[in-house]
Amino acid sequence: MGRTEGRATDSDFGRYLDARWGDLVGGLEGEGVPADDARLAVAETLLASRRSWSRRVRDEQVDVSLWAEVRERAGLPTRPGEAVPHGVRPFDPRDAPEVWLARAEERRSARRRRSAFRGLAWLAVAVALAAGWAWWAARPAPHEVREEANPLPVIWYAEGELHLEEVVVELPAVVEFAAWGSGAAARLSSGQVVQVDSDGDVHEVDDAPATLDDPADPPPFLALGPYDVVVQSAPVPGGGWVHLLDSSRRESVLDGVRLSESGRRAIVVCTADFSCGQPRTIFEADGTIRLR
């Protein structure tokens, strides 16, 4: 597979591969991760980010958030705020990432096939025992759901949980999400897209909604203080926007979306006519929340 054929069509993704592949792999190897395991961990993490790359580059400091995900996938402890080490090793055409991206894709496809096979096997057992209906009724819910009123006017995500209007759904490894009808759509790190109903039911869908793949651009938020940064924005049902602010740093040193070191995170709700309320400090999840 040639470099042009093996790369995502997004040139930014290809340039990032050239610039950071050696550093990502070398950084893991420098902490004792075996060479093949390090390359596969990096490839699987990048593959999971491929479709949402433009969104991640726009909304995150990719070197920070991606390095945390790579370390976690390789079994290393994450280091909040730490970026991909630079200058570990130069790009080596003999150690190009394409073959490892292809292997990661094969592993992902195999996992999906195994998951489908397990589902068919369970169904066959249920039919053979003439108790399919009982098995479906008695099986444990795949995602824990609890009733909890949302204190914010929009859906949000923190610490592996998606907060809808009336329920909180345990949903690890969410890469991005968006409101969809009365619930939400979410893309997981595996690449799977799921629909989360308003009652917390989670099920896979074939096609992602436009709100997930092509979110609307938020209007500018002009009432910023000298050290305020707009981290993320999300539309409010019925009109208007919510802006997530961080008051601890300037934009040039903004860290990952999931992180907030010592600064104050707050939200500001603006109506459709651009009138905005007072900032509300985020105490939930220590302020480390996401709106998208």
Image (cartoon, rainbow, N blue to C red):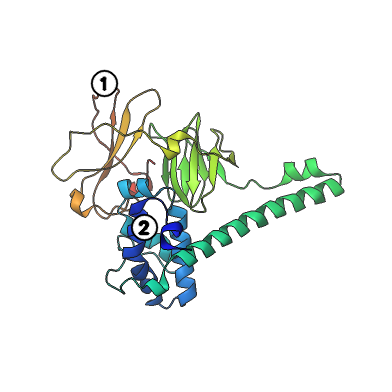
For badge 2, the amino acid type reads: Gly
Q: Could you say where residue 222 lies in the image, as x and y percent from the top left?
A: 18, 33
- Quadrant for residue 38, please give it: bottom left
Q: Secondary structure at mark 2?
A: helix
For badge 1, the amino acid type reads: Asp
Q: Is residue 158 left or right of residue 217?
A: right
Instruction: Say which mark, if any, is on residue 253.
Output: none
Residue 73 showing in the rendered view: no
CA gap, disc 2 and disc 1: 40 Å
Q: Nearer the viewer, residue 30 or 182?
A: 30
Residue 86 showing in the rendered view: yes
Q: Could you say where residue 117 lies in the image, as x and y percent from the top left?
A: 71, 54
Q: Secondary structure at mark 1?
A: loop
Which residue shows up at 52% across the image and 53% down it?
190
Q: Residues within 10 Å of mark 1 (few under 14, many from 20)?
A: few
Q: Could you say where residue 3 lies in the image, as x and y percent from the top left?
A: 41, 62
Q: Are marks 2 and 1 in contact (CB under 8 Å)?
A: no
Q: Earlier in the sequence, mark 2 or mark 1?
A: 2
Q: Is residue 224 left or right of residue 12?
A: left
Instruction: Say which mark, if any, is on residue 273.
Output: 1
| Residue 9 against residue 177 in the figure, above or below | below
Q: Could you say where residue 99 lies in the image, as x and y percent from the top left?
A: 49, 67
Q: Nearer the viewer, residue 170 or 281?
A: 170
Q: Is residue 25 left or right of residue 222?
A: right
Q: Nearer the viewer, residue 157 or 208?
A: 208
- Quadrant for residue 33, please give it: bottom left
Q: Pointer 2: what residue?
A: 14
List the single residue furthest toward the left. Answer: 226
